Structure formats: structure tokens, C-alpha cells
Image: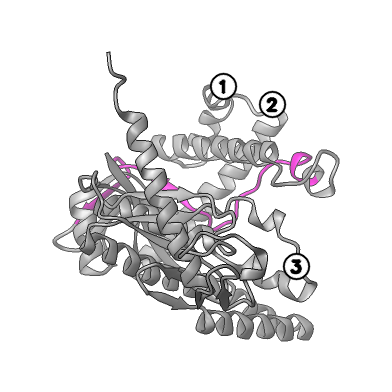
Amino acid sequence: MAVKLVTQVKLMPEADQAAALRSTLRTVNEAACWVSAVAFEQGVPREYELRKHTYTELKARGLGAQAAQHVIRKTRDAYTALKANIRAGNLGKPGSKRRIKAESKPVTFRPEAAQPYDDRCLSWQYDQQTVSIWTTAGRIKNVRFACSPGALRTLREYRKGEADLIERDGVFYLVAVCEVPEAPLNEDPAGFVGVDLGIINIATTSTGYRAAGRGLNRHRKRQLDLRRKLQAKGTKSAKRLLKKRSRKEARHTANVNHVVSKTIVTAAERTGSGIALEDLTGIRGRVRLRKDQRTSLHSWSFQQLGAFLEYKARRAGVPLVYVDPAYTSRQCSECGHIDRRNRQSQATFACRACGFLSNADDNASRNLARKGVTVWTAGRESRVPATP
């Protein structure tokens, strides 16, 4: 088994190379919008049928054979994703304005949207750190790229499949798919590390590690206040600054989650333990909060942190199980007594039965660790063949 990762490198083209790349992205995405309109008119046929309606025209527009195929496939994939979002209810209920708007017009592509490349259109020279890439102006060679030594090693050893060319704020990037082999799974972990996720504390483990969310929450509040000021100002320069800073909070949050997840997985790997993570699926719909608390809840990136923990654990061979978080904040990790009054405040846990006093997140993480052992043991037993 392998873990699929994406590795991003920054292209550093010369002026004429940058012009060719920019023109290529504009051309292929304009062509994708045209293909999307044809697909919409034809009732979104299957990829083979769509190719019969569009391939000749795409070739006439100056696209190579592979580029034309990728444009058609990209457009069809966009409609597949739209259909999946509608089916999942992500665009609202039937008849809602958002859903009607999505269904009533063709899918469109931004001029700088990603364009996939396969090995026929893109080749890598790792020693020179250059690429050779197809453009509408012909194939251009010796386009330099920059990345970290670790990313370069991952590309050299594990790159497999397509890479996407994207333009972001005038800078070009290649995002390549890499399939990294998983480490052998530790089938007999020495216990489990319970991980309690939260907003005040991003993550608290049963081994004593606590990732405080104070810095991240302050950063989010600063970004929110700045957005409000710029939106209220409404000038062209304010809108440019809003666009420039649009991904700043997301990048910062992702970096924090990478650091936290790496720390937890490294500790579990060093001690030969597994990881017990609470399953918070659907929590945004279940929880009822005051209006001033909703921003914090909907900014909470627990799903991203969970995904980072999962793939890092697979790479390290660390077992990871999801457990039901029900009553973990009310149950005493010492005597097992469950009472909502045990949780005296957000930070304090005091058992009404045995008097055990602890930080509430520490207590919950120990409960999660115990549940992790139970879930893992039950899973192992279910895999044991029945006695003849």
C-alpha cells in the first residue's frame, strides 16, 4: 500500500517562458469553458461522447492531442464533482437559490485554473532542477523550479501520475502526485495515545502534550478584524489587499496543523503506541452555540488536523483508530463515573464520585486512549478466523 501525497514546486521561468505558460493556461481554460457549455447543452454526456462533440474543435484551437484530452476530462470531472455535491446536499435542498444557480448554468473555469499534465506533456530533470513542458507556443525546455531537499527527494523517488500547472498571484507552480510506500503497521501497539481535539486547545494527548490554540485563535481574530475593515472600506486597493490576503489564514492554519500532527505521530512512533482520535463527524450540525461563538466553531479545522494525523500515521506504520467521543468529557478517567456536573467549567474536571480533579482536556484524552484500546482489540478479534 502507498500513501498518495502532493508535492508542490515553484517554477522560476524566464520572461518569455512565463508569457508562454500564462497564455497556455488562458487558452486551455477558455477551451474548457467552451467544452463545459457544449456538455451542458448535450445534457452532460459521458467522456467518450463528449470527446466526439469537442475534440476536433479543440485541436483547431491549437491544443495538442494530450492537452485536448485533459481539457475534456477536466470538464467532465467538474460535472461529476458538481453532481456529487448536489447529492450530498452541499449546495442546499432542492429548490434553494444556491442549488438552482448551480444547476441552471454551465460550469466555468477561472483563467488561471489548474491544468493537468502527464508524462507526455511534462518531463522532469531532477539533477538540473528543470522541467520541459508543453505550451501553446510549443514545448519549452529548461524551466527552472525550486523546492526543499526533502520535496526533491520525494519527487525523484515517488512521483507517479499527473502534475497540475497552476498560477497563483502571478507565480507558477507544479503540483505533482507522489505515492509514498506505507511503513509496516505495528500490529501490537503498546497502548494508545488519546487525542482530544478542541478550540481552546487544538489537541491534548493522554501523554501530556498540549497544543494551545491561543496563538492560532489570535491570528484568526486579527484576520477577521482586518477583513471587516477592508470590506467596509470597499476601495479598489482594499479589494486588492483582500484578494492578496485571502489564503493567509488557511496557510497559517495548515502549517500549525502539520506541526501538531507531526509531533503527535512522532511521539506515538517512538513509544510503539497507536493513536485514538475522536470521531467528530457532523459536530457542526449537532452543536448549538451563541451567535458570537459560531465563527470560532466554523473556523475550527479539526477535519484537516485529523486528515494530517491519518496520513502521517500511515507513513510511519502507527495504528490509528476513530472512537466515539460520547461522554468522554463527562466521564471520570479514574473511576468511570459519568455525570454532566463533573465538568465544572471549560478547563476543570472534578469527579462527583471519587473526587478526582484534573484538567478537562487531559481527562478526556485519557478516556479516548482507553476507548482506543477497546476498539483496536475488538477489531483484532473480528479478524481472527472462527475455530473449526
2 or 3: mark nearer the eye: 3
Mark 2: which amino acid? Gln
Residue 108 x/y as whole percent: 65, 48
Name the residue tied to disc 1: 49
**Residue 340 appearing in the image:** yes
Give above or below for 356 relative to 28: below
Residue that mark 2 sits on: 42
Q: Residue at x 70, y 33 (%)?
A: 40
Q: Mark 3 points at which residue?
A: 289
What's drawn in magenta, residue-wise?
Answer: 101-125
| Rendered image: mark on residue 204 | none
Q: Badge 3: few (under 14), some or many (20 or more) residues near its Cα, within 10 Å?
A: few
Residue sitting at x 68%, y 36% = 87
Nearer to the camera, 244 or 208: 208
Q: Which of marks 2 and 3 is nearer the N terminus?
A: 2
In the drawing, does residue 46 fall left or right of residue 107?
Answer: left
Q: Taking 18 as reference, is 53 left or right? A: right
Q: Of all residues shown, which one is farthest toward the left?
A: 127
Contact between labelled residues 2 and 1, with CB atoms less than 8 Å apart: yes
In this view, the residue in front, 202 or 221, is 202
